[in-house]
Structures are given as C-alpha cells and as structure tokens.
C-alpha cells in the first residue's frame, strides 16, 4: 500500500524569493556560528557550559569538544528541516490534502519550516554565544518563542487553507 505522501498531488508551485532568501540566511547564520566556534575553539577552556537554565545562566558543564557535537547536531537538524521544506508533499497536515488545496498547503508548510529554521538559528546563536562567555539568555527565549510562534502560525495558516483553491491552478 503506498504512503499518503505518494498518493498526494506533486508539488507544482515555485518557491517565493523571500522563502529562498530566508532559507539561505538560515544556513549562512549557522555557517557564521560554525566559523565563530572553530575560531574560538583553541582558546576555550577544557570545560565549557553545556546547558543553560531559564535565567540564561550556565547550570551544567562538559568537555570543550561537546561544543563541536552541539554544532554538528544543529547542522543535521537545520539541514533536515531545510531538506523537508523543499519536499512538503512528505509532511503531515492538519487537514486532508486534495488536488485543489495541495499547492496552498505545501507552500504554507514550506514557509513554516523555513521560518522555523530562522528561529532555530537564533536559539543556536544564543547557545553558542553563551558558551563563549557572553550573557544572552534573553536571546534563547526570543528564539524559543519564535519556534512556538512559527509553529502555531503555520498550523493556523494551513487550517485556513481549507476550502480555498490555488489561484495558480
């Protein structure tokens, strides 16, 4: 039996310029973070913060190399979300995907995932900057609030697609 994604209409819309730019900015942001970590790495102490409490203060420590693991995990996460954002047919949706609403749903899902990448870069930047010794606990909260806001807004926008049809169809 074929998967639900395999039976859905193929993606036919073109990704908007703003979405393309945001996807690129997310990846450039992570590249900048990675470069900053690699440049600072030789000068870091053997033990670095590995977790931050709600107040933005470090509350757990680990070996310096754990920072490289964190950056690696962040890359896998962002690359995976970026890859999925270009393949919205594969995702789960809050309503039935039909021939008439598929392109609108796919477009909203792609936008949501790309904005989620941006919010996660903010969280990643805040965590790395915190590990490097700067106080930016507030930025972690901004990024986390962004992930929540993007997810809720994306789901609401997808639900509102119900009954609309793609004007490009």
Image: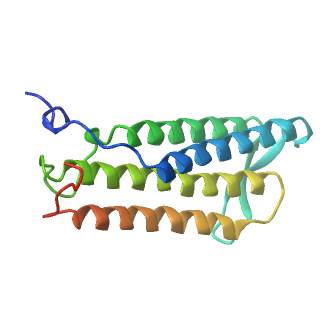
Image location (x, y in percent) of residue 47: 82, 44
> In this rendering, would 18 be left or right of 109?
right
Name which residue lies at 28% across and 44% down.
Answer: 91
Q: Nearer the viewer, residue 60 or 32?
A: 32
Relative to 91, residue 144 above or below: below
The N terminus: image quadrant: top left
Which residue occupies the extreme right position in the image? 43
Name which residue lies at 55% across and 48% down.
Answer: 21
Image location (x, y in percent) of residue 64: 79, 39
Which colour scheme appears in the figure? rainbow
Residue 56 visible, this angle: no
Name which residue lies at 40% across and 61% down.
Answer: 151
Name which residue lies at 31% across and 62% down.
Answer: 155
Q: How many discs appear?
A: 0
Instruction: Determine which quarter of the picture holds residue 71.
Output: top right
Relative to 156, residue 34 above or below: above
């Amino acid at each position: 039996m074929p998967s639900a994604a395999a039976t859905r209409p193929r993606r036919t819309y073109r990704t908007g310029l703003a979405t393309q730019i945001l996807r690129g900015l997310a990846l450039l942001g992570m590249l900048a973070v990675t470069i900053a970590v690699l440049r600072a790495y030789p000068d870091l102490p053997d033990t670095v913060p590995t977790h931050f409490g709600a107040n933005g203060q470090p509350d757990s420590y680990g070996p310096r190399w754990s920072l490289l693991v964190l950056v690696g995990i962040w890359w896998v996460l962002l690359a995976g979300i970026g890859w999925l954002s270009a393949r919205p047919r594969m995702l789960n949706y809050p309503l039935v995907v039909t021939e008439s609403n598929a392109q609108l749903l796919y477009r909203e899902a792609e936008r949501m995932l790309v904005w989620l990448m941006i919010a996660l870069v903010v969280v990643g930047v805040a965590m790395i900057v915190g590990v490097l010794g700067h106080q930016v606990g507030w930025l972690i909260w901004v990024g986390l609030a962004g992930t929540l806001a993007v997810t809720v807004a994306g789901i609401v926008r997808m639900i509102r697609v119900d009954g609309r049809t793609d004007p490009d169809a």
